[in-house]
Image (cartoon, helix red, strand yellow):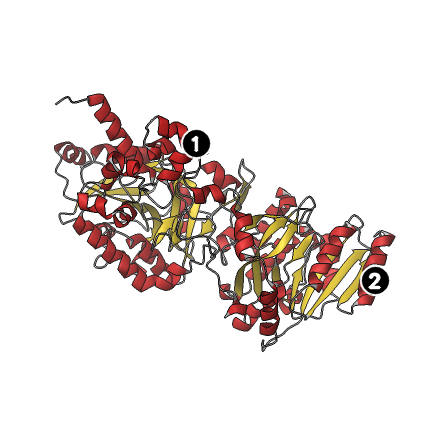
Amino acid sequence: MNFNLTKWLKHWRDYWLVKKSGLFNADYYLNHYPDAKRAGLDPIWHYMKFGWKEGKNPSPDFDTTYYLRTNKDVGLAKTNPLVHYIKCGKAEGRPPSQSIADELNSYKIWMEKYDILTSSDRAEIQSHSATFKYQPLISLLMPVSNNTPQQRMQEAIDSLFSQLYPHWELCIAADTSSDALIRQFLDAYSHQDPRVKVTYHETKGRVSTALNAALALCSGDFIGVLDHNGILREHALYLVINELNEYPHADIIYSDEDTMDDKGDRDDPFFKPDWNPDLFNSHNYLAHFTVYRASLVHQISGFRKEFESAQDWDLAMRLSETVPSSNIRHIPFVLYHNLTNDSSTTSFSNVSDEVQYEVLKSHFARINQNVEISFTEDALLRLRYPLPDPQPFVSVIIPTRNHLKLLKVCLDSIMEKTTYASYEVLIVNNQSDNPEILAYFESFKKDDKIVVLDYDHPFNFSAINNFAVHHSRGDVLVFMNNDIEVISPEWLDEMVSHAIRPDIGAVGALLYYDDNTIQHAGVILGAGGVAGHAYLNLNKKYLLHKKGAFMVRNYSAVTGACMAVEKRKFEEVGGFSEKHLPVTFNDIDFCLRLLEEGYRNLWTPYAEFYHHESASRGYDGGLEKRIRNKREQHYMIKKWGGILRNDPAYNPNFTLLRNAYSLSFPPRIKRPWKE
């Protein structure tokens, strides 16, 4: 028998490449291919040796046959298609499946299938509207200036006349310098329909002044802003009123939006989360279409001219400070088209850094918080919350069993890079038996920063961490896997500054694979059954260019691979579940219990790490382990099924079946006129 060491090493390297990629789903593979399960082999080895040649798929996100069919060079080279994709294809932009290829141009497909009203829909909407017990008047404000394109303005106004809910009024404020044709155009509309009110004001070019002049004309219970370059979907006001009938206490209601070009083609959908305070503090994601309870707008004196170009963000910010979070509602439908090649009167892209700074400075002054406001080199808003003096003492908890090399990389990166001074590291030794690592532990006996705790019981992630918390001295806890490596020197400053905020529960970080693609940027509930990671396998550049992606934001859960939380909050919710979730989903369950107690969980992109994921535990694929995993999954679905199906941090127009933030075919939304 000839043994080829070079070939064996290549296979071994490829095995680990696939294992760490996040593109191989062992449960999916074994459940879909019973012959692979009967073979009794490690599923990755089975795929590497036999599966790809038989056309088997390693996960729902990679189609072996499709990849070989569309990349003839890979087939001719007799190369494993998944290995090729990881090494080369991904960087070259080769789609891993037909569905993902379609997603490159999928919004048009999705929209045509699910987001165009039929005549039957219109009839049902009008019929449903007539049954509403509460049918308030909605006032739409439109500021107009001398340079407002008449064609765009007409399209915006006509979108109101197309509304399937009839109780509205349009309040237009134009400056007195407006072109005679524009004045003639506006006066004609006001004479044609009493629902159109027009006023003229002296101040030229000030949007905030125009909005306040329009506001003075309003008689509606709710107000919204309709830009001259925006189009309302015909069911927009209907869905707002439907929401008010279901949630009568709603004070702010906002929808999703997209863009439309001169040909009427739609693009660039902005599918938003439900109310997300920390995201809102960095980005006016409410934007269009948003309506406000009119009485509250009048109470705070409307729009403020000192925040010109960000007057809508300032208004929403002041209102959000005075109303309960439960009174801020999100309608997950695209109800507004931003017409491209024009400047919106309330477009956030046209707001200067100085005005954004002043909006936030004013906000934090009102709520008595001293927050440092700055802009990153990528022109993104960044908020730094203050740390008290002295700094809170932090306990960094790292469970381990053997794996000296991994642990050493982790510890060295903490000790050499961390700028935060006040912390201890608790290494929880879970029955290590390697002489080298035991000697390594001995070297810390005289170290006042690193403590080794012995946990001489079978592996139970929840119990190990709860045990360490009991022995910790920190006011803040950081749970960290032994396969984590620090990138950001100020990681602890960033995570602790959020963790000690009274309303924040768990704080998560930005984790990368070895190839610098994203392993964790927040957790999406329900993805893959219980939970999955946001932006998995994408790169940082993608986050930087995606609306609101590279910003501090609230997620329902974050991974326990690197998580910070105040000790008192950890103890308040009872720590990790040792009995029901000894290995998996304990971090998700913990985060959801924090939500139950009224805390918000948070993810920050400004604490960056490498996560050499699962390198320390290996494939969790033995029969006993798979049974345990299914048991824990069943427990989570039974306990948290409602929120797992409807994650408030994740728009229901996105899928739970593939990579997070891909469009859902069909969307997971309810059409109230169909019920």
Disc with the residue nearer the chain's start (2 vs 1):
1
Where is residue 424 shown, x and y percent of the image?
28, 42
Q: Based on the displayed image, in which of its 4 quarters is residue 642 positioned? A: bottom left
Vertical arrangement, residue 149 with respect to residue 410, above or below: below
**Residue 582 location, x and y as percent?**
22, 54
Q: What residue type is labelled 2?
A: Ala
* Residue drawn 57% across the image and 51% down it: 284
Whether residue 371 is visible, yes or no, is yes
Q: Where is residue 99 in the image (x, y as percent from the top left)?
A: 44, 45
Relative to 569, is 373 above or below? above
Image: 347 above or below 251: above
In this rendering, the count of numbered labels is 2
Residue extending furthest toward the right: 180
Q: Does residue 423 sit above or below 87 in this rendering?
A: below
Residue 278: give x, y in percent of width and height.
Answer: 49, 52
Q: Can residue 621 be seen in this view?
A: no
Q: In which quarter of the image is the N terminus?
A: top left
Residue under label 1, please give it. 91
Q: Distance between the residues labelled 2 and 1?
A: 57 Å
Q: How crowded is mark 2: few (under 14 residues within 10 Å), some or many (20 or more)?
A: few
Q: Mark 2 points at which residue?
A: 188
Residue appearing at x 62%, y 58% in the figure: 315
Q: Which amino acid type is shown beneath numbered disc 1? A: Ala
